[in-house]
């Protein structure tokens, strides 16, 4: 299959890559040694492959790589830029919100997006928002705790003077 | 004993890796020159292979090779594997025994080319009669295996060698006292049957193995729960010494029993050796349903009860649907079978437990090793007896509960088994004695409590080594696999406690059979106890050497070790290494001809669950309002992690209780995807979940700890069934209990 060159922004940095017509975003990221978005169910049902395209979450196992041309692709690997964990990442650790960790990238990206849209989600709103992601270890109660922790922390940071 | 590191609820040591997308999964590995494998699978449930036409596949541009069972024979003349029976061919030979069985493999540099080529293979079969149901398989004329092939290494399986014309892979029997006499004189006799369905683990990191051929050796990278077994089994197949097979395992993206023994390891090793290139085989979620599953089962249970509501005798017949290959099924039949009478003090018992071959995808171990199937039946039965006798179900359990110091039906005297404490914790946390609102109109409410117990597979061995560096940091080498349960962290806490250092200063070397010592496998909640003891011994061995060094160089004897100081005094600078080694195997007595043993398990796992449900009698919808889990885990090494193990196990079992079921049509799984096979999501968990660690201490465990990964699965299914019964008067005896099933039961429609 013929490969063609595309350029896009990966976690804010310009990248050139060669892609086949059938490559998905997960394939593309694997080729770039980014393993945080993972194919599991292969049908866009589990959310392990969640990435952000132009700031919106998509299932990386279903999205064709060619279509990323010229766009921003953000992944879990971009969250701790500068070596500091994001508030949500830290909240996942503090709440013990994962066991095997295979689905964790997807959940963290979704919680980031949730809190960007709604800084004080109720548990029910959080459940609704995260219902497209699955966790076979069933760390759901702890994930909901992490949402609460992260929301509180984000708000307290906003109150502090810069 | 006061401890500082043991009992600390610190986060998993690999937490940062996991939240930044840098988890160390086998899935990440890319090897230079690697080719991708795609499996071509059987489309018939039972048949003789007449021909396999691979010509179109091999002609597809980009295909490296197409391999069939005949090719495997060139390097492995006896290509049959399995932990109890050597019955499973690496690729089908002569016969196929289930839809989805691997028949051939395509290798290509591009995984999509491999997948396309696999579609071009054509196999012709002479179809044979098939059998799917475990009870039918007992007497069916359809025979799955022409001859039984137990692994000759197990003395208790030797009598099965060469047995023909049967689908019964193993039958286990236990006989204690005179059950027949007890039944003849019983005030009440109760008899029920219960069934469970076939389900699948669905680990989110699908099964994956890679193999890299070397000079007279092979390296296998695998998402495996049993690297030591994988090494010895692949070495046995190849006829090589173990030290020429290296198995490396990173963190697992879930296991739950799916990644035990060998699954893809022998296949990738054979492929890599045949084509002299590294090979990667990663299954899809769908393919996992054709690889390993949880036993469907039928359980006939009968109890004799006296006028005071005491169970005097119990007869259990359990039939396990093992699918086409035995995997660990015979061990489930036996090692779980002997607990079929439940955690009750019963004078006389007969247990008959049968492992059956059928033409379904193979069944193995899934979080509980058969115990959830047994608890489902004996606790449902217990509730039905209590109802008929008009005794409160908790009170009825109290009257019959098996207490420490009393003999289990095997004859083993119970010890460090807080069964009563688990029951009482549940009763208290469920506020059992308070009035309960049963709802009104079409929304009815009910509640149930169930408890279960499990013996630990025995006897098994764990070995660990601890290397202490001159700066006081320590490295722990072990072949226990951390698949999310937190073993790396818990084991490090043991090392830190013994060496008086911080857990954060212990580094775990993940399984690499060239480096890490033997461990039987990461299964059956055995690691905390077995490997925990080995790690403790290894750390103590290192500590003894450090104390000797301290004494030699004239350092004052203190309770707290100052490791850097000892090394500096001994070697004049930051130099040297101290290595401690520990091996653990518990004592054990094999069951006699009646299935009895006075030392049948090194420890007992005890778990239970209480639930409150709301049933919509119009639609059959079942909503869990509350779930309370309690378990005896001895003294928890890391309370926070074990609490998440409790809720995770219970929620997983909730899936097996109300939604998950593999549906088969003519042997073909018709719902092999997360779209049609419904696992619990975040909206399915009860709004109120509590997890309670019952105060207990395991005297032979490391710092009093015992295993916990499965305990909270035990009680879930029967507690939900009782709660549904309590709510709307309908007793369901078959899993899963979906809204559809309940609707039909409520509205009189037969399935």
Image (spheres, coloured by chain):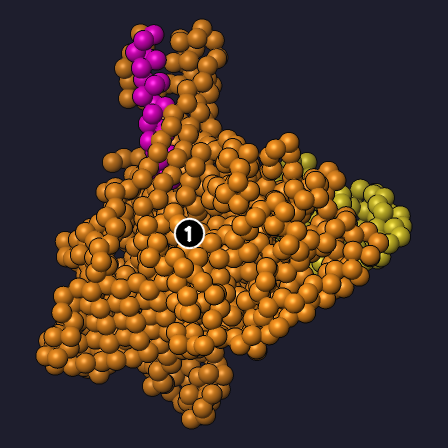
Chain colours: A yellow, B orange
Q: Which residue occupies the foreground of this view, B671 or B429? A: B671
Q: Position of residue A99 (x, y in %)?
A: 50, 50
Q: Position of residue B350 (x, y in %)?
A: 22, 68
Quadrant of res B195 = bottom left
Q: Position of residue B635 (x, y in %)?
A: 30, 45
Q: In this orientation, does residue B116 appear?
A: no
Magenta stretch?
B531-553
Instruction: Judge the density around disc 1: few (<14), some (14-19), many (≥20) Cα neighbours within 10 Å.
Output: some
In the rendered image, residue B542 lying in the magenta stretch gets the answer yes
The relative height of residue B725 versus residue A23 in the rendered view (above or below) is: below
Report the residue at 25% width, 42% height from top.
Answer: B587
Report the residue at 39% width, 74% height from top.
Answer: B138
Q: What residue is pinned by disc 1? A: B151
Q: Which residue occupies the foreground of this view, B154 or B189? A: B154
In the rendered image, residue B640 lying in the magenta stretch gets the answer no
Q: Is residue B273 left or right of residue B493?
A: right
Q: Position of residue B285 (x, y in %)?
A: 61, 61
Quadrant of the snapshot with the N terminus of chain B: top left
Q: Is residue B6 left or right of residue B383?
A: right
């Amino acid at each position: 299959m013929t490969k063609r060159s595309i350029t896009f922004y990966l976690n804010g940095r310009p990248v050139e890559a060669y892609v086949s017509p059938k490559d998905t975003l997960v394939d593309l990221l694997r080729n770039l040694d980014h393993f945080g978005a993972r194919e599991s169910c292969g049908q866009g049902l589990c959310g392990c492959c969640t990435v952000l395209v132009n700031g919106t979450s998509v299932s990386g196992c279903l999205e064709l790589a060619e279509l990323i041309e010229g766009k921003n692709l953000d992944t879990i690997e971009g969250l701790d830029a500068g070596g500091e964990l994001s508030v949500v990442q830290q909240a996942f650790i503090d709440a013990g919100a994962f066991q095997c960790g295979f689905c964790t990238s997807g959940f963290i990206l979704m919680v980031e997006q949730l809190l960007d849209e709604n800084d004080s989600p109720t548990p029910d709103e959080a459940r609704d928002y995260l219902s497209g992601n699955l966790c076979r270890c069933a760390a759901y109660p702890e994930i909901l705790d992490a949402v609460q922790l992260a929301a509180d922390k984000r708000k307290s940071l906003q109150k502090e003077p810069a | 004993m006061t401890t500082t590191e043991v009992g600390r609820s610190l986060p998993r040591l690999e937490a940062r890796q996991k939240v930044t997308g840098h988890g160390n999964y086998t899935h990440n590995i890319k090897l230079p020159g690697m080719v991708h494998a795609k499996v071509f699978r059987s489309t018939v449930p039972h048949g003789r292979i007449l021909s396999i036409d691979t010509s179109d596949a091999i002609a597809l541009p980009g295909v490296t090779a197409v391999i069939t069972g005949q090719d495997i024979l060139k390097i492995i003349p006896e290509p049959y594997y399995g932990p109890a029976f050597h019955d499973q061919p690496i690729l089908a030979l002569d016969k196929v025994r289930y839809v989805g069985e691997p028949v051939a493999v395509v290798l290509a540099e591009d995984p999509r080319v491999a997948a396309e080529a696999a579609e071009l293979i054509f196999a012709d079969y002479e179809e044979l009669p098939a059998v799917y149901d475990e009870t039918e398989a007992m007497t069916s004329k359809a025979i799955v295996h022409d001859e039984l092939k137990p692994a000759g290494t197990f003395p208790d399986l030797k009598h099965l060698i060469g047995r023909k014309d049967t689908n019964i892979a193993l039958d286990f029997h236990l006989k204690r006292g005179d059950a027949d006499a007890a039944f003849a004189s019983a005030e009440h006799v109760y008899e029920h049957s219960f069934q469970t369905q076939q389900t699948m683990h669905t680990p989110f990191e699908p099964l994956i193995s890679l193999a890299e051929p070397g000079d007279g050796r092979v390296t296998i990278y695998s998402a495996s729960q049993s690297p030591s077994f994988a090494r010895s089994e692949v070495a046995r197949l190849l006829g090589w010494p173990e030290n020429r097979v290296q198995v490396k395992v990173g963190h697992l993206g879930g296991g739950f029993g799916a990644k035990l023994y060998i699954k893809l390891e022998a296949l990738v090793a054979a492929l890599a050796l045949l084509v002299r290139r590294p090979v990667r085989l990663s299954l899809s979620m769908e393919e996992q349903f054709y690889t390993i599953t949880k036993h469907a089962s039928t359980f006939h249970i009968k109890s004799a009860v006296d006028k005071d509501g005491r169970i005097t005798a119990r007869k259990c017949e359990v039939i396990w649907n093992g699918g086409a290959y035995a995997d660990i099924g015979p061990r489930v039949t036996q090692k779980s079978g002997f607990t079929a009478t439940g955690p009750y003090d019963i004078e006389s018992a007969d247990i008959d437990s049968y492992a059956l071959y059928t033409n379904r995808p193979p069944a193995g171990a899934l979080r509980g090793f058969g115990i959830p199937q047994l608890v489902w039946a004996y606790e449902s039965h217990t509730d039905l007896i209590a109802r008929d006798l008009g005794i409160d179900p908790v009170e009825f359990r109290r009257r019959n509960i098996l207490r420490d110091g009393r003999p289990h039906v095997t004859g083993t005297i119970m010890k460090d088994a807080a069964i009563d404490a688990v029951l009482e914790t549940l009763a208290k946390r469920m506020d059992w004695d308070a009035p309960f609102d049963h709802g009104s109109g079409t929304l009815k409410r009910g509640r149930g409590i169930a408890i279960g117990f499990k013996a630990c597979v025995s006897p098994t061995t764990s070995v660990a080594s601890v290397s202490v560096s001159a700066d006081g940091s320590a490295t722990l080498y072990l072949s226990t696999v951390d698949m999310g349960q937190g073993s790396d962290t818990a084991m490090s806490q043991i090392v830190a406690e013994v060496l008086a250092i911080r857990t954060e200063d212990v580094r775990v070397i993940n399984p690499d059979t060239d480096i890490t010592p033997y461990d039987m496998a990461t299964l059956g909640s055995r690691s905390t106890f077995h490997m925990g003891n080995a790690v403790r011994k290894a750390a103590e061995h290192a500590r003894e050497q450090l104390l000797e060094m301290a004494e030699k160089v004239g350092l004052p004897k203190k309770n707290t070790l100052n490791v850097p100081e000892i090394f500096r005094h001994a070697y004049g600078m930051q130099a040297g290494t101290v290595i401690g080694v520990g091996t653990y195997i518990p004592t054990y007595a094999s069951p006699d001809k009646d299935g009895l043993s006075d030392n049948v398990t090194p420890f007992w796992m005890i778990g239970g669950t209480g639930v409150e449900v709301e049933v919509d009698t119009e639609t059959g919808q079942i909503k869990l309002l509350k779930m309370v889990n309690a378990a005896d885990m001895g003294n928890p090494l890391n309370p926070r992690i074990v609490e998440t193990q409790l809720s995770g196990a219970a929620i997983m079992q909730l899936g097996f209780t109300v939604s998950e079921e593999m549906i088969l049509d003519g042997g073909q799984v018709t719902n092999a995807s997360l779209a049609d096979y419904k696992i619990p999501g975040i909206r399915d968990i009860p709004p109120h979940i509590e997890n309670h660690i019952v105060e207990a201490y395991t005297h032979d465990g490391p710092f009093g700890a015992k295993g916990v990964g499965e305990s909270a699965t035990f009680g879930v299914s029967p507690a939900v069934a009782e709660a549904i019964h309590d709510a709307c008067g309908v007793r369901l005896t078959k899993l899963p209990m979906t809204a559809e099933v309940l609707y039909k039961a409520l509205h009189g429609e037969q399935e």
